[in-house]
Image (spheres, helix red, strand yellow):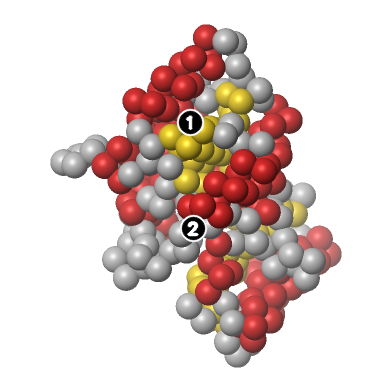
Amino acid sequence: MNVIRTVGEMRAAVGTARSDRANIAFVPTMGALHEGHLSLVDAARQRASLVVMSVFVNPLQFGPGEDFDAYPRDESRDADLARDRGVELLFAPGLDEIHPPGRTTTVSVRGMVTSVLEGAIRPGHFDGVTTVLSSLFHIVEPHTAFFGQKDAQQLAVVCKMVHDLRFRLEVVACPTIRDADGLALSSRNAYLSDDERVSALSLNKALKEGAAVLRETDDVARAEEAMTRVLDVPGVVLEYAKGVDPDTFESPARKPVLLVVAARVGRARLLDNMLVS
Ligand code: AMP
């Protein structure tokens, strides 16, 4: 595995691969790798002859007072995990390589998909995501890019950007990887104490309960109430429990409905979701 630090080296490496007719898959991450990230690499290897992963903690997608400084970083562990799983090119650029000093360009997807839920709670977050991804897509020029269903709203935003800007790549969505007890893997789970980890299980419990109510009644409001009830426990500060259209994040006219929850547990802000079709 080659670790690449600069845009120039990355362009040269993928340029050579392209002229050798490689099919290039891209897995963008912020590092602190876990099985969720590595499942994207597995999926990418099924589809491509060359897997590129980026590890870049993108300051643009963190708001003031969020955990940019505290975000877990361990580059040598990430490099070992990526290499063992079959990543060929690991792109770990410095800040200035991706965001040139004086940058004044932002890529912004408008509409419900960026204005509700995460978009409302984290103003500017999705602009940060789409701006960095459009830079990374231009640098890596992959045929496919792999994203986790775990961050369902981010996935919907990326699909919209790729569609609207006619990026020449296919977005591939991959299922959420969970611990045996149902907790969705997240780099931010590292912030949880043992007790908080137990409280965090209520996110997945709430989704299961909401899905059962929705299947039985076809009533999104009742599913939302059921999820809210399950999340009303000590140690969990609910941010939202909603049912939305999985593509637009508008109120769902019919199934499939995506149930989405977000809550704070201790220092960690956790997200989870479940598609009910
Ligand atoms: P992050 O490093 O948090 O920006 O995540 C990088 C990619 O990994 C995103 O596409 C996430 O949706 C995906 N991802 C994170 N956690 C999981 C998980 N538990 N299962 C599957 N994909 C995940």
Q: Is residue 64 left or right of residue 187?
A: left
Q: Secondary structure at mark 1?
A: helix
The disc label shown at residue 141, or none: none
Disc 1 designates what residue? 162
Q: Which residue is mark 2?
A: 74
Q: Position of residue 68 (x, y in %)?
A: 37, 62
Question: Which residue is located at x 66 percent, y 72 percent?
Answer: 203
Point out the image quarter for the N terminus: top right
Q: Secondary structure at mark 2?
A: loop
Task: Say whether disc 2 or disc 1 marks the residue closer to the N-terminus.
Answer: 2
Mark 1 CB in 8 Å range of ligand 1? no
Residue nearest the viewer, comparing 254 with 24: 24
Q: Which residue is found at the position 42% from the left and 47% from the top?
A: 56
Above or below, 6 against 17 in this view is below
* Identity, as a three-letter code, of the amino acid under mark 2: Asp
Q: Nearer the viewer, residue 185 or 273?
A: 185
Residue type indicated by callout 1: Val
Q: Does 197 sit above or below residue 20?
A: below
Position of residue 154 relative to residue 230, above or below, is above
Mark 2 or 1: in front is 2
Q: Residue at x 57, y 77 (%)?
A: 192
